[in-house]
Image (cartoon, rainbow, N blue to C red):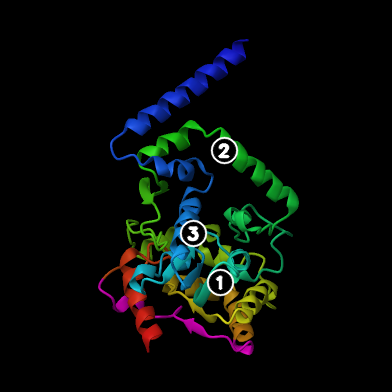
Amino acid sequence: MKNFIKDIGFYFLIMMTILFLIGYQGFDLSNLKNIISKYPLFTKKADYFETFIKDKNSINLILGSSLVEDSIIPDSLGNNWFSFTNGSQNIYNSYKFLEFYQDLVKIDTIIIGIQPFDLPYSYIKNREQYKPYNSDAFHKYGSYIVNDKFSTKNEIQKIKSSLFPDLLNLIKLIKHNEKETTNEKEIDRDVWTKQGFSGRINHPALNLDNLYNTQLKNKRWAYNYFYNVNKKPNMKYFDLFNDLAKSLNIKLIYVLTPKSKYYHLDLAKYGYDSIWSHILDSLESRKVKVWNYEKMNTENFKFNWFWDDTHSSYDGAKAFTKIIRKRLRD
């Protein structure tokens, strides 16, 4: 009886919080589903995409991980471009997304990022927390990449989260977006445009010199990106995506976004440069179009291009999008 009264009190508090937030100035009730979701940004972007394709005869897509998410602004490429890019999104996630929509919308061109974590020898064996990178949110499109037990557990958690949202998620309704913390400062996250742009527009850019001198190896992106990646790359997931896109007569452009000099120093320091060289050779042997900007000189620009050793700042994204737009038109 005591526990029952406690539970009633808890959910009464939740309902009062919801009523307060509904009355809060500027609150949009349509965002409720997105916020109580385990993946609010992903859910919002997926909803935007469904709306985006409704009145389009054909579209162009940008796919990939947060490296592409932070680097290319779809709105600046034209009205037919949509960015379905998300943190930890690998090429198998993108494959399942493309497979899901192949009969629902015609796709003319895809720009997709390619990273070492797209080519691990296994996503299951020797798995360490979140590595190799994989976006659980793609379960929506049938992307059960790790294993059935892992996927079922996450599905149950998503249902639980939807039916019984915790108070922290409800409080997020005030801002109706996600936040992440960096250097003890909260950074707003949202899908900023109806074309799917969700780059970290207000993440402070950094002078990377101090970061490189103090950052531990396991915090560096080179170490994390190459986890489970062998010298002989596993091209299985790449070939799945590439073959499906070719069968649909989609123009494919694989893009390597700019990386800082410190990322490249780490490749040499930890022996990843030879692995990456084999990956580039494997791409070349497949006769695919690769736009490689990894070693682009970003220091010529009058701003700090990066907010860490691989992710572009908003200024970097605006500059890089201009480069991509010009090349698309040439």
- Where residue 288 appears, x then y in whole percent? 57, 86
| 46 relative to 21, above or below | below
Q: Secondary structure at mark 2?
A: helix
Q: From where the camera sits, is residue 274 visible?
A: no
Q: From the image, tell me which residue sits under label 3.
A: 50
Mark 2 or mark 3, earlier in chain:
3
Could you tell whether 100 is left or right of 194 in the image? right
**Image quadrant occupied by the N terminus:** top right
Q: Which residue is mark 1?
A: 115
Q: Nearer the viewer, residue 195 or 295?
A: 195
The disc at residue 161 is 2
Label 1 to label 2: alpha-carbon separation: 31 Å
Q: CA distance from mark 2 to mark 3?
A: 23 Å
Q: Would residue 303 appear left or right of 50 to someone viewing this image?
A: left
Q: Is 282 inside the magenta-drawn segment?
A: no
At x 39%, y 61%, the residue is: 199
Residue type, mark 2 in image: Ser
Give yes or no for residue 290 being in the magenta stretch: yes
Q: Residue at x 61, y 36 (%)?
A: 160
Mark 2, other Cα within 10 Å: few <14 / some 14–19 / many ≥20: some
In the image, which residues are magenta?
284-302
